[in-house]
Amino acid sequence: MIRVISLDMDGTLVKSRFVDKVWMEGIPSLYAEKAGLDYPAAKEYVIGEYTKIGSDHLEWYDLKYWIDKFGLSISKGELLELYEDEIEVYPEVREALDLLAENYELVVTSNAAREFIDIELDGLQDYFRETFSATTDFREVKKSPLVYGAVCAHMKAKPIEVLHIGDHYSYDYESALDAGLDALFLDRKGERCGREVVGDLREAVELIDGFM
Ligand SMILES: [Mg+2]
């Protein structure tokens, strides 16, 4: 029996535009100003530095690390606020969460750092019992089976009582299954098909109502 439903954040609840803007426009433009470079040159340099660290390291996800590294005179909060207007929740999310919240405890399991979760879910927080950041809370760079195990432990749930939904095939779907959870793969682009593939969260609700 499913008791807890875990949702990914970026690409699942919230469009990726905000995160992309912060990293790919915010930091480069502040660095351009600081270093006296034109924007394209600053962007190329900044992206080169991101690539050197790579997404397998915790620093990749750590806004404060990059602000300090580039010597920018802005706080994490101020930088995030610059792009706050770009945060956009997918259109079916509230309706889907309203329906799911009637029967399940809802949580968010994201690899985004805590400060991104707090700002991106502003206005949706009341739906969720807990929000888990793989990087901030568990010091894991990817949502490994260990992360899902830790989420279950926090929720005092057995893995079979938890269903995770997210848009990354390996970190949201395969990894959750490896940890013994149920999982649905959210394929908003409609590239995959299968019994556990859904095109949006409304479809996920229908599937959960029908089979769980
Ligand atoms: Mg995602």
Image: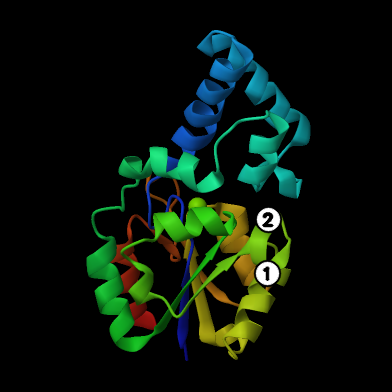
Could you classify mark 1 by the number of other residues whose Cα lies within 10 Å: few (under 14), some (14-19), or many (20 or more)?
A: many
Identify whether 203 is placed above or below 54. Answer: below
Q: Ligand 1 within 8 A of label 2's CB?
A: no
* Picture quadrant where residue 178 is located: bottom right
**Does the beta carbon at disc 1 come under 8 Å from ligand 1?**
no
Tell me the number on the disc at residue 142.
2
Determine the residue positioned at 70% across, 63% down: 144
Percent of width and height locating residue 108: 48, 68
Find numbered disc 2 in the image and state the secondary structure of the residue it sits on: loop
Q: Which residue corresponds to the image point at 59% horizontal and 19% vertical from the top-left?
A: 34
Q: Which part of the image, by quadrant, shows the C terminus?
A: bottom left
Report the residue at 51% width, 22% height from top.
Answer: 29
Kindly identify the amino acid type of the residue bearing the numbered disc 1.
Answer: Val
Residue 87 in the image, given as x and y percentages of width and height: 35, 46
Task: Assess whether mark 2 and mark 1 are in contact (beta carbons under 8 angstroms).
Answer: yes
Q: Please identify the quarter of the rendering in which residue 112 is found.
A: bottom right
Left or right? Give the position of 125 relative to 30. Answer: left
Asked if residue 99 lies left or right of residue 164, the reply is left
Q: Which residue is mark 1?
A: 147
- Please tell me which residue lies in front, 83 or 9: 83
Does label 1 or label 2 sit earlier along the sequence? 2
Q: Nearer the viewer, residue 90 or 205?
A: 90
User: Residue shown at 54%/17% (left/top)?
Assistant: 33
Q: Position of residue 189 (x, y in %)?
A: 38, 43
Q: Work out which residue is located at the far front of the displayed protein and give it.
A: 73
Count residues near mark 2 (Cα–Cα under 10 Å), then give few for <14, some for 14-19, many for 20+. Answer: many
- In the rendered image of this protein, does residue 148 appear above or below residue 167? below
The image shows residue 142, relative to residue 153, as above or below, that is above
Q: Which amino acid type corresponds to the residue marked 2 in the rendered image?
A: Lys
In this view, 126 is above or below 45: below
Q: Is residue 124 visible?
A: yes
